[in-house]
Image (cartoon, rainbow, N blue to C red):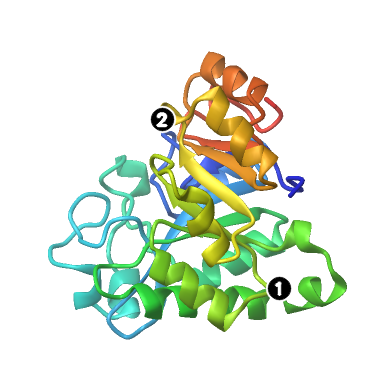
Amino acid sequence: MSWPHARVLAHRGGGTLAPENTLAGLKEGMRRGFRAIEYDIMLARDGVPVVMHDPYLGRTVAGSGNVFDYDAAELAALDAGGWFAREYEGEPVPLFVEFAGFCKAHGVWMNMEIKPAPGYDIETGGTVARIAAALFADEIARGEMAAVPLLSSFSHLALEAAREVAPQVPRACLMSELPPDWERRAQSVEAVAIHTNHKHLTPQLAREVRAAGYGLFCYTVNDPERARELLSWGVDAFCTDRIDLIGPDFA
Protein backbone atom coordinates (compact mmCIF):
# COMPACT_ATOMS: atom_id res chain seq x y z
CA MET A 1 0.00 0.00 0.00
CA SER A 2 1.04 3.60 -0.37
CA TRP A 3 0.53 5.07 3.11
CA PRO A 4 -2.31 7.61 2.77
CA HIS A 5 -2.31 8.73 6.40
CA ALA A 6 -0.35 11.08 8.66
CA ARG A 7 3.24 10.03 9.27
CA VAL A 8 3.44 11.03 12.93
CA LEU A 9 0.76 9.91 15.40
CA ALA A 10 0.29 11.01 18.99
CA HIS A 11 0.64 7.88 21.13
CA ARG A 12 -2.49 7.35 23.23
CA GLY A 13 -3.46 10.95 22.61
CA GLY A 14 -1.30 13.23 24.66
CA GLY A 15 1.91 11.23 24.87
CA THR A 16 3.78 12.15 28.04
CA LEU A 17 2.03 15.53 28.36
CA ALA A 18 -1.43 14.40 29.48
CA PRO A 19 -3.12 11.27 30.82
CA GLU A 20 -3.13 8.55 28.19
CA ASN A 21 -6.27 7.36 26.42
CA THR A 22 -8.41 10.23 27.65
CA LEU A 23 -10.26 13.06 25.97
CA ALA A 24 -7.94 15.46 27.78
CA GLY A 25 -4.96 13.67 26.25
CA LEU A 26 -6.50 13.82 22.80
CA LYS A 27 -7.15 17.55 23.17
CA GLU A 28 -3.54 18.14 24.25
CA GLY A 29 -2.31 16.40 21.11
CA MET A 30 -4.72 18.44 19.01
CA ARG A 31 -3.55 21.64 20.69
CA ARG A 32 -0.06 20.80 19.47
CA GLY A 33 -1.27 20.30 15.92
CA PHE A 34 -1.73 16.54 15.81
CA ARG A 35 -4.58 15.27 13.68
CA ALA A 36 -3.69 11.58 13.95
CA ILE A 37 -3.79 9.38 17.03
CA GLU A 38 -3.11 5.85 18.23
CA TYR A 39 -5.24 4.55 21.08
CA ASP A 40 -6.41 1.32 22.71
CA ILE A 41 -9.85 -0.28 22.97
CA MET A 42 -11.17 -3.14 25.10
CA LEU A 43 -14.54 -4.36 26.28
CA ALA A 44 -16.21 -3.70 29.60
CA ARG A 45 -18.23 -6.45 31.30
CA ASP A 46 -21.41 -5.47 29.45
CA GLY A 47 -19.70 -5.72 26.05
CA VAL A 48 -19.44 -1.95 25.60
CA PRO A 49 -15.98 -0.91 24.34
CA VAL A 50 -13.96 1.63 26.32
CA VAL A 51 -10.69 3.40 25.63
CA MET A 52 -8.11 1.77 27.91
CA HIS A 53 -4.74 0.10 27.56
CA ASP A 54 -4.47 -2.13 30.63
CA PRO A 55 -6.91 -5.00 31.25
CA TYR A 56 -6.86 -4.11 34.95
CA LEU A 57 -7.32 -1.01 37.07
CA GLY A 58 -4.73 0.69 39.24
CA ARG A 59 -2.10 2.14 36.90
CA THR A 60 -3.98 4.84 34.99
CA VAL A 61 -7.48 4.34 36.35
CA ALA A 62 -8.24 4.51 40.07
CA GLY A 63 -9.62 1.24 41.41
CA SER A 64 -8.85 -2.45 41.56
CA GLY A 65 -9.77 -5.55 39.63
CA ASN A 66 -10.14 -6.17 35.93
CA VAL A 67 -11.79 -4.03 33.27
CA PHE A 68 -14.25 -6.84 32.56
CA ASP A 69 -15.35 -6.79 36.21
CA TYR A 70 -17.11 -3.48 35.53
CA ASP A 71 -19.81 -2.25 33.18
CA ALA A 72 -18.85 0.62 30.88
CA ALA A 73 -20.88 3.17 32.84
CA GLU A 74 -19.06 2.16 36.02
CA LEU A 75 -15.68 2.57 34.32
CA ALA A 76 -16.69 5.95 32.92
CA ALA A 77 -17.32 7.13 36.47
CA LEU A 78 -13.77 6.30 37.59
CA ASP A 79 -10.85 8.72 37.64
CA ALA A 80 -8.49 8.22 34.68
CA GLY A 81 -6.53 11.44 35.13
CA GLY A 82 -5.61 11.95 38.75
CA TRP A 83 -2.62 9.61 38.53
CA PHE A 84 -1.05 11.99 36.03
CA ALA A 85 -1.59 15.35 37.70
CA ARG A 86 -4.04 17.00 40.07
CA GLU A 87 -5.40 19.19 37.29
CA TYR A 88 -6.72 16.07 35.55
CA GLU A 89 -8.52 14.58 38.55
CA GLY A 90 -11.93 13.29 37.58
CA GLU A 91 -11.07 12.81 33.90
CA PRO A 92 -13.26 9.85 32.91
CA VAL A 93 -12.53 6.65 31.05
CA PRO A 94 -13.88 7.39 27.55
CA LEU A 95 -16.47 5.25 25.85
CA PHE A 96 -15.10 4.17 22.48
CA VAL A 97 -18.12 5.37 20.49
CA GLU A 98 -17.94 8.86 21.98
CA PHE A 99 -14.15 9.07 21.67
CA ALA A 100 -14.13 7.92 18.05
CA GLY A 101 -17.00 10.25 17.23
CA PHE A 102 -15.09 13.21 18.68
CA CYS A 103 -12.02 12.29 16.63
CA LYS A 104 -14.06 12.05 13.45
CA ALA A 105 -15.84 15.33 14.10
CA HIS A 106 -12.50 17.11 14.51
CA GLY A 107 -10.72 15.48 11.58
CA VAL A 108 -8.42 13.31 13.69
CA TRP A 109 -7.38 10.11 11.91
CA MET A 110 -7.32 7.01 14.10
CA ASN A 111 -5.16 3.95 14.50
CA MET A 112 -7.50 1.92 16.68
CA GLU A 113 -5.58 -0.75 18.54
CA ILE A 114 -7.84 -3.64 19.46
CA LYS A 115 -6.52 -4.62 22.88
CA PRO A 116 -8.69 -7.49 24.14
CA ALA A 117 -8.62 -8.60 27.72
CA PRO A 118 -7.53 -12.26 28.00
CA GLY A 119 -10.18 -14.52 26.50
CA TYR A 120 -12.15 -11.71 24.81
CA ASP A 121 -10.29 -11.55 21.49
CA ILE A 122 -13.12 -12.47 19.14
CA GLU A 123 -15.77 -10.35 20.88
CA THR A 124 -13.49 -7.32 21.04
CA GLY A 125 -12.28 -7.55 17.46
CA GLY A 126 -15.79 -7.95 16.10
CA THR A 127 -17.31 -5.18 18.20
CA VAL A 128 -14.63 -2.59 17.39
CA ALA A 129 -14.75 -3.41 13.68
CA ARG A 130 -18.54 -3.22 13.53
CA ILE A 131 -18.61 0.19 15.20
CA ALA A 132 -15.77 1.55 13.04
CA ALA A 133 -17.55 0.36 9.89
CA ALA A 134 -20.80 2.02 10.93
CA LEU A 135 -19.11 5.28 11.90
CA PHE A 136 -17.32 5.53 8.55
CA ALA A 137 -19.93 3.90 6.31
CA ASP A 138 -20.25 6.98 4.11
CA GLU A 139 -16.50 7.37 3.62
CA ILE A 140 -16.14 3.69 2.80
CA ALA A 141 -19.00 3.88 0.30
CA ARG A 142 -17.33 6.84 -1.41
CA GLY A 143 -13.93 5.11 -1.44
CA GLU A 144 -12.38 7.76 0.81
CA MET A 145 -10.17 5.22 2.57
CA ALA A 146 -7.60 7.76 3.75
CA ALA A 147 -10.20 8.92 6.27
CA VAL A 148 -11.13 5.42 7.47
CA PRO A 149 -9.43 4.18 10.66
CA LEU A 150 -6.87 1.41 10.65
CA LEU A 151 -7.55 -1.47 13.03
CA SER A 152 -4.40 -2.97 14.53
CA SER A 153 -3.86 -5.71 17.08
CA PHE A 154 -1.35 -8.16 18.49
CA SER A 155 -4.24 -10.62 18.63
CA HIS A 156 -4.61 -12.72 15.51
CA LEU A 157 -8.04 -13.86 16.67
CA ALA A 158 -9.19 -10.27 17.07
CA LEU A 159 -8.04 -9.38 13.56
CA GLU A 160 -9.76 -12.45 12.14
CA ALA A 161 -12.97 -11.43 13.88
CA ALA A 162 -12.62 -7.87 12.58
CA ARG A 163 -12.16 -9.14 9.02
CA GLU A 164 -15.19 -11.40 9.35
CA VAL A 165 -17.45 -8.64 10.69
CA ALA A 166 -16.21 -5.68 8.65
CA PRO A 167 -13.81 -6.67 5.88
CA GLN A 168 -14.07 -3.16 4.41
CA VAL A 169 -12.22 -1.62 7.40
CA PRO A 170 -8.44 -2.03 6.88
CA ARG A 171 -6.35 -4.03 9.31
CA ALA A 172 -2.73 -4.06 10.46
CA CYS A 173 -0.74 -6.81 12.18
CA LEU A 174 1.02 -5.73 15.35
CA MET A 175 4.20 -7.71 16.08
CA SER A 176 6.91 -6.67 18.51
CA GLU A 177 9.47 -8.58 16.44
CA LEU A 178 8.77 -9.78 12.93
CA PRO A 179 8.90 -13.60 12.90
CA PRO A 180 10.02 -15.51 9.82
CA ASP A 181 6.39 -16.10 8.84
CA TRP A 182 5.28 -12.49 9.29
CA GLU A 183 3.99 -12.23 5.73
CA ARG A 184 1.90 -15.38 6.02
CA ARG A 185 0.31 -14.00 9.18
CA ALA A 186 -0.46 -10.71 7.48
CA GLN A 187 -1.94 -12.42 4.45
CA SER A 188 -4.17 -14.63 6.58
CA VAL A 189 -6.04 -11.60 7.94
CA GLU A 190 -5.71 -9.59 4.70
CA ALA A 191 -3.71 -6.89 6.49
CA VAL A 192 -2.59 -3.78 4.66
CA ALA A 193 0.17 -2.79 7.08
CA ILE A 194 2.71 -4.14 9.53
CA HIS A 195 3.15 -2.41 12.90
CA THR A 196 6.28 -3.25 14.85
CA ASN A 197 8.56 -2.17 17.67
CA HIS A 198 11.20 0.09 16.13
CA LYS A 199 13.82 -1.40 18.47
CA HIS A 200 13.70 -4.70 16.58
CA LEU A 201 13.47 -3.31 13.04
CA THR A 202 16.43 -3.48 10.64
CA PRO A 203 16.93 -1.83 7.26
CA GLN A 204 16.64 -5.25 5.60
CA LEU A 205 13.33 -6.05 7.30
CA ALA A 206 12.01 -2.62 6.38
CA ARG A 207 12.88 -3.25 2.73
CA GLU A 208 11.20 -6.65 2.81
CA VAL A 209 7.97 -5.27 4.27
CA ARG A 210 7.82 -2.44 1.77
CA ALA A 211 8.73 -4.72 -1.15
CA ALA A 212 5.87 -7.04 -0.18
CA GLY A 213 3.47 -4.11 -0.55
CA TYR A 214 2.65 -3.43 3.09
CA GLY A 215 2.59 -0.15 4.95
CA LEU A 216 5.21 -0.05 7.71
CA PHE A 217 4.47 1.62 11.03
CA CYS A 218 6.66 1.72 14.15
CA TYR A 219 5.98 2.25 17.83
CA THR A 220 6.95 4.12 20.06
CA VAL A 221 9.60 6.49 18.70
CA ASN A 222 10.62 9.21 21.14
CA ASP A 223 14.02 10.29 19.84
CA PRO A 224 14.12 12.64 16.83
CA GLU A 225 17.39 11.20 15.53
CA ARG A 226 15.97 7.69 15.63
CA ALA A 227 12.82 8.91 13.90
CA ARG A 228 14.89 10.33 11.03
CA GLU A 229 16.80 7.08 10.71
CA LEU A 230 13.61 5.02 10.52
CA LEU A 231 12.13 7.30 7.89
CA SER A 232 15.33 6.93 5.87
CA TRP A 233 14.79 3.17 5.94
CA GLY A 234 11.37 3.60 4.33
CA VAL A 235 9.20 3.45 7.45
CA ASP A 236 5.88 5.05 6.54
CA ALA A 237 4.78 6.32 9.93
CA PHE A 238 5.30 6.06 13.67
CA CYS A 239 3.72 7.08 16.95
CA THR A 240 5.46 9.06 19.66
CA ASP A 241 5.03 9.91 23.33
CA ARG A 242 7.24 12.96 22.94
CA ILE A 243 4.79 15.18 21.14
CA ASP A 244 6.79 18.08 22.59
CA LEU A 245 9.93 17.00 20.69
CA ILE A 246 8.48 15.39 17.57
CA GLY A 247 5.67 17.42 16.07
CA PRO A 248 3.02 16.41 13.54
CA ASP A 249 5.03 17.91 10.67
CA PHE A 250 8.30 16.24 11.66
CA ALA A 251 8.24 13.82 8.73
- Distance of label 1 from label 2 (alpha carbons): 34 Å
Which residue in the structure is indicated by mark 1?
A: 136
Which residue in the structure is indicated by mark 2?
A: 200
Please tell me the numbered disc located at residue 25.
none
Q: CB atoms at circles 1 and 2 under 8 Å apart?
A: no
Q: How many C-alpha atoms fall within 10 Å of the one at disc 1: few (<14), some, or many (≥20)? A: some
Is residue 248 or residue 194 the one in the foreground?
A: 194
In the depicted structure, whether residue 51 falls above or below residue 200: below
What residue do we see at 24% from left, 68% from top?
Answer: 118
In percent of width and height, residue 47 lies at 36, 83
In the depicted structure, whether residue 218 falls above or below residue 225: below
In percent of width and height, residue 130 lies at 56, 80
Screen quadrant of the C terminus: top right
What residue do we see at 47% from left, 41% from top?
Answer: 196
Q: Earlier in the sequence, mark 1 or mark 2?
A: 1
In the depicted structure, whether residue 70 falls above or below residue 90: below
Indicate left or right for 249 with 37 as reference: right
Q: Is residue 139 visible?
A: yes
Q: Looking at the image, which residue sits at the far left?
A: 64
What residue do we see at 31% from left, 40% from top?
Answer: 85
What residue do we see at 60% from left, 40% from top?
Answer: 209
Secondary structure beneath dot 2 equals: helix
Name the amino acid type tagged 2: His
In percent of width and height, residue 187 lies at 57, 61
